[in-house]
Amino acid sequence: MNDVLPFRSLLTPEGHALLDEVRGTDPADELAVATRLRREHPADLVSAALGQARLRQRAAAKFGAEDAERMFFTPNGVEQSTRASVATYRAGRLRELGVTSVADLCCGIGGDAIALARAGIRVLAVDRDPLTAQVARANADVLGLGDLIEVREADVTEVDTAAYDAVFVDPARRGGRPGGAARSASLRGGGRATGGRIFDPESYSPPLSWAVDAATAARVAALKIAPGIPHEAIPAEAEAEWISDGGDVKEAVLWFGAGVEPGAVRATLLPGPRSLLGRGLPDPEVRSVGRYLYEPDGAVIRAHLVAEVADSLDGGLVDPTIAYVTADELRPTPYASAYEITDQLHFNVKKLKALLREREVGTLTVKKRGSAVEPEELRRKVKPQGPRSATVFLTRVAGAPTMLIGAPANG
């Protein structure tokens, strides 16, 4: 409760005025600004306002500057909230499934509830942490969504969701956030989220088994999980979807209920969205490196849909354990980035350095898959110089450490 009182003070006229005054404060100037403001305002309020300013700057990448400058955050809330583009996509899919009301369990600071409400969906947002619930309620109000979002401070395992069309569950997957609460160490925002990632689904809070039971009891449900969840842990009655945004894998979602295909697997790429549905294809054959190398999107790899991409490209793998697809023709696909390969070398730093010097390569992009060599380490050793650019892939080809040199393909 120690953090709740300073947060409430931010919601007063004095708090709002302070937040306006410290907006955009440079971290290098914080001490001088704090010293000046503490002459006229309580020290706890000044610290809370400066903490919010810092958190809002960090949150802009997820929520956009316009929303982030008005919203309230906790350190864990910034770290663990869903990116707005992903939450908007998921809310749109729930809307397509005919959902008009959702119980958002483990709501955190309200990022998903905001996206749901903006899609016209009525939301019950539940979190057991007092500060987190206060922040979620303030965010609903400041964004003008208070009529659609009811925030309740409660244990999600004790909430009756029968009156809602759908359930959305976002269990905690880091230590230090008990019961689905995005608990902050303080309002000051100086530290990162506490606790490490949790990889065992039964160590989620609440556990995955409870979340699945809650999901299967609803007409429609979406359960957010870590992208690295083992496929064997996915319930047979769920559709599994991996979502990336701008090439970065953001989350996996298990879908249940009406309108969902049990056992289906898909990768969805944002912006778009573009969705690749699994067809149960066998692993692609291994081929010698052709003219083009395709790097599948991370969501495709996590969803185990590299075979679907390879099939669409008439391609194969460079190695049975590596998710690089090779092909002789350049074909457009939104699910992989294409590179034209000019050289294939056994791993040898001296030979690579000589080749790059000969071609006057000064801008070197290093990608790796199946290699222990760090890109920065390789760049230091080859010391690229010159006006041209190239991409080197550190990988394995038929089990052998290999360097593939090329550039992004045109067309």
Image (cartoon, rainbow, N blue to C red):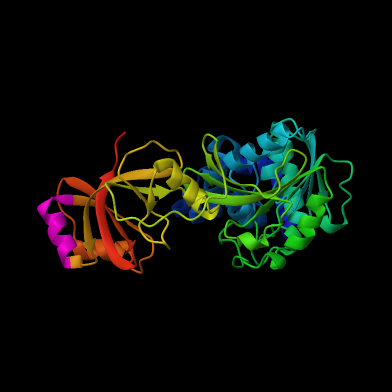
> Height in image: 95 above or below 304?
above
Which of the two residues, 198 or 192, is positioned nearer the viewer here? Answer: 198
Q: Quadrant of residue 287?
A: bottom left
Q: Position of residue 128 (x, y in %)?
A: 79, 57
Q: Position of residue 368 (x, y in %)?
A: 35, 60
Q: Position of residue 211 (x, y in %)?
A: 77, 57
Q: Main secondary structure of the magenta part?
A: helix
Query: Is residue 162 rendered to the left or right of residue 283?
Result: right
Which of the two residues, 357 or 129, is positioned nearer the viewer here? Answer: 357
Q: Quadrant of the N terminus?
A: bottom right
Q: How many labels sit on residues? A: 0
Q: Position of residue 180 (x, y in %)?
A: 73, 58
Tell me if I can see residue 376 in this picture.
yes
Please name the residue shown 63% across and 37% down the image: 88
Which of the two residues, 411 or 159, is positioned nearer the viewer here? Answer: 411
Q: Quadrant of residue 387?
A: top left
Tell me if I can see residue 1 in this picture.
no
The answer to whether residue 356 is magenta is: yes
Q: Which residues are magenta?
A: 350-361
Query: Is residue 335 rendered to the left or right of residue 206?
Result: left
Please name the residue shown 89% across and 41% down the image: 163
Point out the residue furthest to the left here.
Answer: 358
Query: Is residue 304 rendered to the left or right of residue 147?
Result: left
Please name the residue shown 29% across and 54% down the image: 289
